Amino acid sequence: MVVVASGRSAAPREGRGSAVGAEVAHLRALLAAAADAGAARVVVLGSSDVAGTASTVRGTTPAAPTTLYGQMKAAAEDEAVAWRDRGLDVVVARLAPVHGAGKDRTQALVRAAARRVVPLPGGGSHSVGFVLLADAVDAIWRLAELRGGAPLVSVGAGDVPLGALMSALGRAQHRRNVLVPLPVPANVVRMVIDARVPEAMHRWLRFALPRSVVMETDVAPTPLAEAARRLAQDVEC
């Protein structure tokens, strides 16, 4: 089996055409090598970002990326599906934002939850895209063990309300934070995102929109309280 985890983890500085082309060419070379070596199964790590502003992401959710990074991953999906049509047993894992030790976004999230007052874009009652690193690894392993099935599979923790996440992270750090809802009209956020805002701003605005990335493997996502405890512990280390 082969797991392809070497794609870009962030959008590069070069323009769209060269970035997308480079991502596809890289994956094409790897899949060709896997096919030549007779690989029984190939798992390509993708991103739920290919679904743009969709509130629920599954493997069957249409690709509608709103960022260059999403466009790169959507093009990579197309390449993988093309190889599958030629007979290579390949599956793409549409990963939710992965949180765990060593990730800058995780450190920022945990530290934000430790503040006395925590603003919640969009009110905080909606779900946000999230998956614990350990759960993502388990899901990828399961996909590698399987044969056939759907060509695109989502890997996330499902419904993770932003308010509940920030509250759990606060408790895990022994902090009593005050959650302050910041109502942000979803249609306004979508208009701004569609205007191709910088990637860093896009990540912040995304918290104002509902997002649930379904776990389409038989791995049970870690309960939120335990996930928060692990994340807080990892950041302290």
Image (spheres, rainbow, N blue to C red):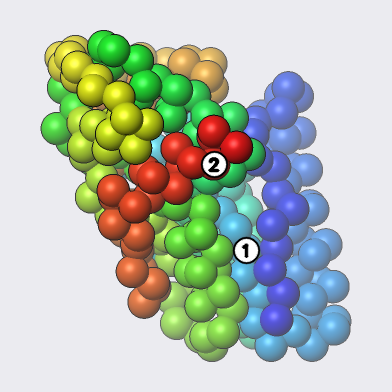
Dot 2 surroundings within 10 Å: few (below 14), some, or many (20 or more)?
A: some
| Mark seen at residue 44 | 1
Toward which corner of the image does residue 170 lie, by quadrant? Answer: top left
From the viewer's side, name the closer residue of 207 and 52. 207
Disc on res. 28: none
What's the residue at 32%, 30% (across, down)? 174
Measured along the vertical axis of the image, is residue 141 above or below residue 160?
A: below
In x, y percent, where is residue 162?
A: 25, 33
Residue type at tag 1: Val
Q: Which mark identifies residue 234?
A: 2
First in residue order: circle 1 vs circle 2: 1
Q: Which secondary structure, mark 1? A: strand
Q: Amino acid at mark 2?
A: Asp
Relative placement, left or right, of 73 versus 162 is right
Q: Position of residue 132 (x, y in %)?
A: 45, 52
User: What residue do we see at 60% from left, 58% from top?
Assistant: 45
Does 128 sit left or right of 72 as displayed? Answer: left
Q: CA distance from mark 1 to mark 2?
A: 27 Å
Q: Residues within 10 Å of mark 1 (few under 14, many from 20)?
A: many
Asked whether residue 114 appears in the rendered view, the answer is yes
Q: Quadrant of residue 13?
A: top right
Tell me where residue 108 appears, x and y as whole percent.
49, 24
